[in-house]
Image (tube, helix red, strand yellow):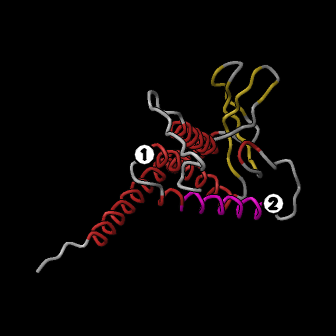
Amino acid sequence: MLVWNPVTDENRKETEGLRRRAFLLTMGVSVILAFDQATKALVASRLVPGESIEVVPGLLHFTLVHNTGMAFGLLSGSDIPFKSVFVTLLSLAALAAVMYYAVRSPRGETTTLLGLTFILGGALGNILDRAHLGYVIDFVDVFYRDTHWPAFNLADSSICVGVGLLLLESLRKHEPAIGREPEPEVAGGSGRGEP
């Protein structure tokens, strides 16, 4: 005789949801990682460090930079002992936290999963450079006159897009519902059943 067990059914749905999110995450991260590594390899094969190619006159060049610091050159000019190890360990810790959150993100939060996918893909791209080369290949050089934004790459851009998506999702969750009446407060308490 078959007996329906709601706990088992719920566990099965949760497991299927985790597998689906992990699969989508893996596919998305793989695509971002492939594009990041391909663009870095292309630029490194065509330019020597410091060499530039003009893309948009007065605004954008491709300039090969070996970044020993973090995203957008943070810490690249400092001589901290074991900087490479420190930056790699910090990146791996952040990566592990984002991976955990991505797999555990609630079902139906597509924007959150997409944002985390962009962050993971970008973080992995830069960690691979650091582990393999000891530095990150940056090449996008945006500037106006004498003012330059620190050189960056597709991985850095991906991380920024991911953070932007998470911020948008956070704002969307916290915006007040239009036309909804506020819940009445219960006299003598906080409205949560407290005395």
Task: Find residue 110 and name its label.
Answer: 1
Give residue 26's quadrant in the image: bottom left
Q: Crowdedness of circle 2 by 10 Å Cα count: few (<14), some, many (20+)?
A: some
Task: Find residue 83 and name its label.
Answer: 2
Alpha carbon of mark 2 to alpha carbon of mark 1: how far?
36 Å
Asked if the stretch drawn in magenta spans residue 184, the answer is no
Which residue is situated farthest in the bottom direction here?
1
Q: Residue at x 10, y 81 (%)?
A: 1
Please, what is the dominant secondary structure of the magenta stretch?
helix
Tell me the amino acid under the disc marked 1.
Thr
Q: Which residues are magenta?
A: 83-100
Q: Residue at x 44, y 54 (%)?
A: 106
Residue 118 is situated, as x and y percent measured from the top left of the image, at: 53, 46
Tell me the amino acid under the disc marked 2.
Lys
Q: Residue at x 37, y 63 (%)?
A: 19
Camera-near label (2 vs 1) is: 1
Total tally of numbered discs in the picture? 2
Mark nearer the N terminus (2 vs 1): 2
Which residue is situated farthest in the front direction here?
188
Where is 179 relative to 106, above or below? above
